[in-house]
Amino acid sequence: MKETGLYIHVPFCRRKCLYCDFFSGGASVADWNAYTEAVIEELRQRVDELTATPSTLYIGGGTPSLLPPESFMRLIENICELTGKKDSWEEFTIEVNPDDVTPELCAMWRGCGVNRVSMGMQSFDDEELRIIGRRHDSAGGIRAYNILRSNFSNVSIDLMFGLPRQTLDSWRMTVERAISLRPEHISAYSLMFEEGTAMTVMRKEGRLSFPTDDECAKMWEMLSCMLKRAGYRQYEISNYSRPGYESKHNSRYWTSNPYLGLGPSAHSYDGDRVRKSNPTDLRGYLAHYTGSNPDGRWFEEECLGDEELMEEYVMLRMRMRMGADLNQYAERFGAEAASRLKRNAARHIKDGSLEIADGHIRLTDSGVMIADQLILDLLM
């Protein structure tokens, strides 16, 4: 039986970052009691979808560190009761904003079983942080990290490159500062211009300057070289860790293992063919699960066909540096499908952007920056 994970989406932020397109609303109007009860009720209705007692729990957002202690403790107590969770979590992650971190909150999280914390730092340059709308500055982020460091043995920080007015020198400083803190895990994302975000609008109007594509490629190369020298291993396109500290929960997504997602906009997968998604509708979510008659499903469902499963396998596995397992691919989708995959990979193996090693097709260092195009070519 495959292991399973549980994800909870907390759709509230004190202030929305200018680049963010994740579903979230203002924390000032949050009804934390109603939200907590709604998530508990959703789990009560959907707990049978779990194929086993979950071994990983991930609370993301939004800004989960805004959850009041009483709401957080009630939520975790009910999760353990409803899922039959009696032992400690293999991995229990909460995402936090530096401004929210206090010794008291860390003690409460740890007492509820949290054993991994992911903090959104993004940059150690105060001007860059101000421009993208972050609530903290560099000094505040370091203070928060030190509090986390004294409470948890597994800390991850997020960084971003391609930010407005960011330079190669400022990016080098950010990476050096991150390495000096010695977190177990670093996630690094290129700024994406999602439709409808304030950052995209400002770019279209020419109100901000951004690094060029060539400069972003150099930022990624710099990041990879510096982290590799510091002992980090890139195990997924955007994720680096010290050996043994890869994100167990997030790896479920990339290896097609089952997970259940709770909260508005959360997604679920049964590990086989069925994907489910909750609407991005907080008001509707609360009305459904805290109303007088909360029965009936409140999610959309999609059953994947064979072609879609093959596409998903390639898209997800090729995000990981281990790549796509050719023997496993042949067993699941047939020898002809595996041969087609190898044929499509041939010219990219020749040009050095892909390689076959240990029975896997995988990205080389030069292939990572064009991964999206390579994946499309493999699926031809």
Image (cartoon, rainbow, N blue to C red):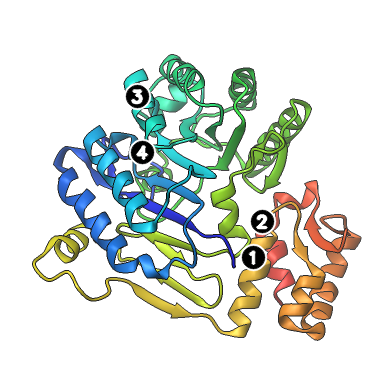
**Which residue position holds label 1?**
315
Mark 3 neighbour class, 10 Å CA radius: few under 14, some 14 to 19, many 20 or more: some
Numbered badge on residue 319? 2
What is the distance, in whole Å, between disc 3 and disc 4 at their CAs? 14 Å
Residue 114 position (above or below residue 261): above
Is residue 295 visible to the viewer in this orientation of the structure? yes
- Which of discs 1 and 4 lies nearer the camera? The answer is 1
What is the distance, in whole Å, between disc 1 and disc 4 at their CAs? 28 Å
Instruction: Give the residue at x 70% y 49%.
Output: 369
Instruction: Give the residue at x 25% y 43%.
Output: 74
- Which of discs 3 and 4 lies nearer the camera? The answer is 3
Q: Nearer the viewer, residue 164 or 32?
A: 32
What is the distance, in whole Å, between disc 3 and disc 2 at their CAs? 32 Å
Looking at the rendered structure, the kind of residue marked 1 is Met
Looking at the rendered structure, the kind of residue marked 3 is Asp
Q: Nearer the viewer, residue 277 or 208?
A: 277
Looking at the rendered structure, the kind of residue marked 4 is Cys
Per the image, label 1 sits on a secondary structure element best described as helix
What is the distance, in whole Å, between disc 3 and disc 1 at their CAs? 35 Å
Q: Position of residue 335 (x, y in %)?
A: 82, 83
Q: Position of residue 87 (x, y in %)?
A: 47, 45
**Which residue position holds label 3?**
99
Per the image, label 2 sits on a secondary structure element best described as loop
**Which residue position holds label 4?**
17
Q: Are marks 2 and 1 in contact (CB under 8 Å)?
A: yes
Instruction: Give the residue at x 27% y 74%.
Output: 297
Q: Nearer the viewer, residue 112 or 184?
A: 112
Q: Residue furthest front?
A: 86
**Badge 4 or badge 2: first in the primary sequence:** 4
